[in-house]
Amino acid sequence: MSADPLTRWLGAARRQRVLRVALSDYVLNGASAAFGMFMVSALMHALFGAEAAANATVGVIAALAPDVVGPRRGKLAHLAVAPLIGVPLFLAVQLLRGHPVGLGLFLVPATFLVFLGMAWGKRGAPVAIGVMLVMVFAMSTPVPTGAAQALTRTFYCGLGCALYVLYAVAAHSLLNARYRTQVTADLLLAVAALLRAHARRVAAAPSPHDDDPAAGLGDLLKRQAALADQLQATRDVVLEAPRTPRRQQLAGMLMVVLEMRDHLVASELDLDRVRQAADHAQALGEIAAIYRDMATDVERLADALLLHQRPQPAADHQARLSALRRASDDEAAASGHAVDEAAALLRGVAYRARHQNDAVRQLAALARGEAAPDLAVVRASWRLFVSPTDWSLQPFFTVWHWRQPALRHAVRAALAVGTGYGIATLLPWGSHDYWVLLTIVVVLRGSLAQTLERRNQRVAGTVIGSLLATGLLALHPATLVMVLAATVAQGVAHAFALRRYTVTAIAASVLGLVQSHMLYAGDSPAFALLERVGDTVLGAGIAWAFAYVLPSWERGQIAGLVRRVLRALDRHAAQSLGLARIDEIDTEPELTWRLARREAYDALSALVQATARALAEPRAVQPPLALLEQLQGHSYQLLGQLSAVKSMLLLRRNQLRLDDLAPPLAQSAARIHDTLTAPASTAAPSPAADDARTTEPGLPAVPEDLPDPFEQDISPWVLRRLALAENLAVRVRRNADQINAQLAAPTAPTDATDATAT
């Protein structure tokens, strides 16, 4: 390929994306892990020789899997768990290497116990994978000549674990400041993508078949769910001990992003009704352009953080938004009548864009050091906003229930590994049976959707990676080149494990074949290629088949997630509509409100993700997907209404009659509470009554004589939001009751076990 075509292919946008990936926190973490493995391997090779280095590398893998970007607090305890479990298992495998039947009988219960670690969620999963990798790679060594050699190998393995843990803790501490900046930049890029998605929603033409205001939010809900996970990961790093000026600057930016998310949710309000007016298309196009420009400013800010540059000030779009109001006034004057309801709603959409404009400018000011971060709440209570780092025994005691997904997954994994081992030992290339087990371990996930995704990515990545490795080995490279190739492959595999697993599968295949060639130099690269691909396809097939054994269908978890959403929305409404909390802002009441808001978003995010996974399941066992999508849309809109009310109470108190609003606020909070928490038999109105309250153009009981949202008394807007919130709470509860009723109904025979798992 010539330079000109390459330059054209690597255009400015693509080069920018490549640079962002190269400067990301996960790539830096992968490079750190690869360097640590290389240092441990080189040190062990220099002190004890090649065999010691190989066994130490296996030990490094145990601690390397959970070595991801996270808080400094509890890092040592997090990394030490896998070696403490993995090293004894390594010894057991070594002692049983010469006894195939005994090894198989050991692998099944050992796999079951290790996979119980999934009960600890995101903290336990990488530990379980690291321990399983140690067991699997322990099978890759030659059969020991006796117990003494097995103990020696185990000593080298344990020493490699210990050295890497010490290195990883030190490296993570040294890189913590850079990680804080990188995760903040990554979060800003996600917010920019969300701003662009909202711009598309603003400018899109309404569908004639879209009579449900909750429809069309699917893509936005998925983005919001992904953002909720990313926000928590960022909190864990950025909000930890925000004591230095730089940490406080980044923490302040994170707090602004949290407010931007609320503004984005509120910006969805009234869009469907405004878009129905044909004469508002030009104004909506201008608002969409403003959102795209704000997204560009946020992206530039993220790039400046990654490049250690001082960001430029963000553009101020207030004049453009004010011009929209003047154009509306001119149209009203020319027509000889006052601003109508649709125009008032359009002005509300424009005003909420002004909130985002202010937030983007505040982000840039914080990054430039021109504004002081507001951290009165989190400075003293940051531990309440980050994930716990201590290990609790509670998951172990609560997992012993037949319907617990973690227990069923452990049984499923043990049976799959046992079956895979039995088949692998019968293959003509049984000396590399661990490749089959390795594929099963990394492909078999807790849900069918995740397993199918991993299966496809693993097979594709293995074929590509094996071809690359075979091409490299055919050149007969020097030992140093192969060591460097293995090191780079390890870094890439670790970096992209949670981002793009296909890239991880490619790198892991290169790593496996290069290491095998160094250990068994007489092997033919072509044979290794065919062997590797065959074992991968076999392992992926076994994992796929066992995904249907004792399945934990998503419908078994949906009822609990729906209850969590209702509780979270109820608590968030109570905290958002309390006037007493406005007088005590930046104190304990605001802390309670922020925690309630986080739980509401997290609960809805969990439901969105479970619904998405259910799409890959057999139709006979799927939950009511259409109702779940309606519930998600109405819950999202309810969050938007509550966010809009809270925003007006906080930011525009001088335009409100607070004494007059106190009774309606209390009444709405009580009604929403009664609706969301009442027994199902009394909470859901008839479909006809519900539709009458929510889909009529006039929205009965909703004041529509609205003033200009840019000035005057905006109390009618608060009353409108309260009435809409009450109506949405009714729809949310009705959707929840319909979902629970369908979940409790008899299902197909294949789902007899899981249909009642609520």
Image: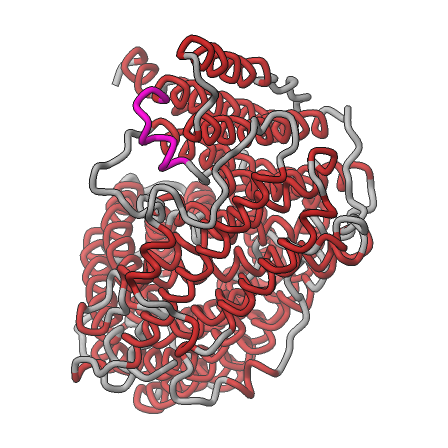
Residue 383, percent across and down? 73, 60
Residue 150, percent across and down? 50, 80
**320 with respect to 270 (left or right):** right
Q: Answer yes or no: is residue 417 visible.
A: yes
386 or 496, nearer to the observer: 386
Quadrant where the image shows the N terminus: top left
Q: Which residues are magenta?
A: 271-280
| 463 is higher (above) or lower (below) than 254 | below
Residue 536, percent across and down? 24, 62
Could you tell me which residue is drawn at 56 percent across and 51 percent down?
33
Could you tell me which residue is drawn at 75 percent across and 41 percent down?
247
| 345 is higher (above) or lower (below) than 383 | above
Residue 574, percent across and down? 63, 61
357 or 313, nearer to the observer: 357
321 or 425, nearer to the observer: 321
**611 with respect to 404 (left or right):** left
Quadrant where the image shows the C terminus: bottom left
Could you tell me which residue is drawn at 62 percent across and 68 percent down?
159
104 or 645, nearer to the observer: 645
Main SS of the magenta segment?
helix
Q: Answer yes or no: is residue 71 visible.
A: no
**143 with respect to 68 (left or right):** left
Is residue 307 inside the magenta stretch?
no
